[in-house]
Amino acid sequence: MTKRVVVSALCCALWVLTTGCGDECTDAFDCRNDNGQPPQGQEWVCNADNKCEQRPLATPAEDAGTDAGTGEEDSGTPVDAGTDAGMPVDAGTDAGTMMEDAGTDAGSMSVPKGEACVSSMDCQQGLRCEGTPSLCQAMYVAVTATADTGGEPHALIMRYDTPGMVPLTDTGTSSRYPRWGPSGARIAFAQDSVETGTNSGNKAGELVLRDVPLVENQATVLADGGTGSTEQFRYMEWEPGPSILYVRRAGGSSSGISLVPTDGGSVAEATQSGTFPDWAGDGKSFAFSTATLGLSVLTVGGATTPIASSGETAEQPHYNRTNNQLLFLRKDATKPAGFDTSLFLVPVTGGTVQMIADFTTESATGGSIDSYIANPIWSPDGTLAAYVRAYFFNPTSGTPELCGGGSTPCAGRPGNIIFVRRINSATGEGAAAEASFVEGGTLPSFSPDGRFLAYVKGGQLYIQQIDPATGLPASGVDAIVHPKGGFTIQTSAGDDHRPRWQPK
């Protein structure tokens, strides 16, 4: 059985979980579907008795839904086109920065939200210096979401601490895959052609650049399907590089990596093959994976250097921007098909490969309970790795079923769990055992200061403050939950759909 089928089974199992099986609700979405939108300032919560109740929006409760999105395989299926709902003003109620006012000592990262600053280093955690006059403001997070009415995809941004999602397109245009520039003042994304309103067939749409804060009708088209030689703009990465990397698509398959200058100039071919590019911290080289070679590194304008020790099945590299170690996934043919992906680490210069998180299996009646690893990411200081374990009941015969639903031996266990593991930066070995961060979440994403972890759960964005001593959720601090507001945050494209923080 292939991993593609496993991921499909995961999604089907989640449908059972999120629609409920006899209880009044299993999550807030059931309550909203059955009872409509709550009054202003309130949100629906599915309580411990699986009953719907309303609570103040300022004190959000954990959503009990389980989200998949752990597969990073490229299905090659074009995203449907559609119509954008416009650009609402970001006017949600501020949930606060969860930081105490520590005064206004410039340069000490102590200036609170809304007060004057000279640079972002003046501002408290989760804030950056912006605007005229310059004030400390909450960083944005960018996501791709599907409109609940019509089902069109939209690239959205939101202040991490403030409910209210803002589309990046002004007109009736679908968009996806938002990526920040190094300064945090510009953002790029793929959108359908404004002229045709379609992304069907071989039309890749456009790669578009906008300034942030957003100005109405201000956008620059950097490339389209013709100039970009692609059917889709996929696996895009920008900061900390000076150019945007993306993977070309031809006939439903990857056909190499291109570079798009953001200050003028033509699209350039960087590689003839490969996928999953990721910039090094200096923005001068990037790692990528190729089907038959494993991992490689390319210095822009130079030659490609394969990392032979990574193994031929190595894929999806993620740079540690402090010491140039790479997290990556690798399959093992000796493990069950579809459950054969584990997490490893290797220095960019090659050498010893370290196991970070392995496939797991345990016996169960009629089969086994197996897990594989997906969606790894580094913390900014390179001391923590976050990743997802996806758990399935794998029957002796038949289709695997995501844990958490039905009557399988793992019905009472979550299908997804985000784990964190502390890494010894000198040796690349695990400095501590993996620890569960949250159940039911996927696509973890660290803030630039490493003090928050964003993730997706049940189609909503969660922002959890981190205890820097443990890497786990800060004690007594609830996650900020961003209500759907007519949008369901997407996870099916794996890292393409990972929440992206505005650089500090």
Image (cartoon, rainbow, N blue to C red):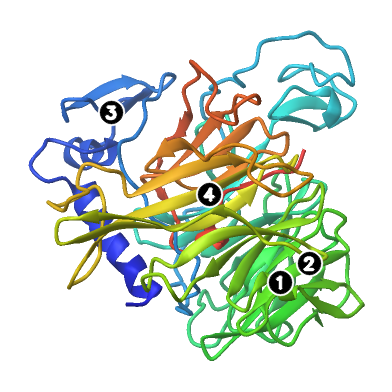
Give the residue number, with chain letter if any, for mark 3: 45
- Earlier residue among tags 3 and 1: 3
Would you name the residue on which mark 1 appears? 309
- Between 452 and 362, the one lying in front of the other is 362
Real-space Cα separation, disc 1 to disc 4, in angstroms: 22 Å
Which residue is label 4 attached to?
Answer: 387
User: Which marked residue is nearer to the observer: mark 2 or mark 4?
Assistant: 2
Query: Residue at position x 82%, y 53% from top?
Result: 281
Front position among marks 1 and 4: 1
Q: Are marks 1 and 2 in contact (CB under 8 Å)?
A: yes
Q: Earlier in the sequence, mark 3 or mark 4?
A: 3
Other residues around mark 3 within 10 Å, as few (<14) / some (14–19) / many (≥20): many
Q: Could you say which disc has been placed on residue 350 in the image?
A: 2
Q: Quadrant of residue 149?
A: bottom left
Secondary structure of residue under mark 2? loop
Where is residue 465 drawn, in percent x and y? 57, 27
Of the 4 image quadrants, the one containing the C terminus is: top right
Q: Measure the alpha-carbon separation of dots 2 and 4.
A: 23 Å
